[in-house]
Image (spheres, rainbow, N blue to C red):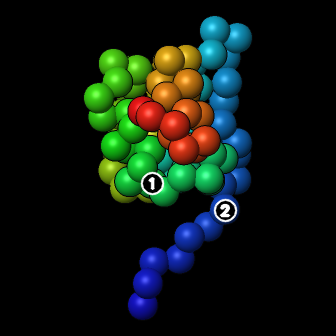
Amino acid sequence: MPPTRFPPRVGLLIREDGTTMGTVQQFADRLGLSESAVRTCLHDQEAVILQAGSGPTQLLVVRAEGIDALRRAARGGSQ
């Protein structure tokens, strides 16, 4: 049986400075990217402050420049 994917109960938390906190799944859902695309995009960025856990529920805290890279990826631009 494939794993059930539940909609995120809480949206991404965005601070004034652009730092954003949420799960990999929440980032993927919000930006219309796959979970692997979120990880790939952020892998080469020095934008991730914290990674806790694993899989789609892995918690990420991402600096503003990481969010910019994810937005570019969502628009189909270069990472």
Q: Is residue 27 above or below residue 46?
A: below
Q: Which residue is mark 2?
A: 7
Type of residue at label 1? Glu
Q: Please report the residue visible at 45 percent of the width from the left and 54 percent of the height from the top.
A: 35
Task: State left or right for residue 59 relative to residue 67.
Answer: left
State the residue lying farthest toward the bottom. Answer: 1
Looking at the image, the residue that sits furthest to the top is: 17
Location of mark 1 (residue)? 35
Vertical comparison of 2 with 66: above or below: below
Dot 2: what SS?
A: loop
**Disc 1 and disc 2: Cα gap in Å?**
14 Å
Residue 5 image point, x, y percent:
56, 70
Of all residues shown, which one is farthest toward the left?
A: 44
Label 2: how many Cα within 10 Å (few below 14, some 14–19, many 20+): few
Indicate the position of residue 64 as horizontal and vertical percent values: 55, 17
The amino acid type, in three-letter code, at marker 2 is Pro
**Between discs 1 and 2, the one toward the N terminus:** 2
Residue 26: horizontal and vertical position, in percent?
Answer: 59, 48
Q: Is residue 31 visible?
A: yes
Is 70 displayed left or right of 44 in the figure? Answer: right
* Mark 1 crowdedness (10 Å alpha carbons): few <14, some 14-19, many ≥20: some
Position of the C terminus by quadrant: top left
Residue 26 visible, this orientation: no
Which residue lies at the image location 34% right of the left edge and 43% below the top edge?
Answer: 40
The quadrant of the rendering that contains the N terminus is bottom left
In front here: 76 or 61?
76
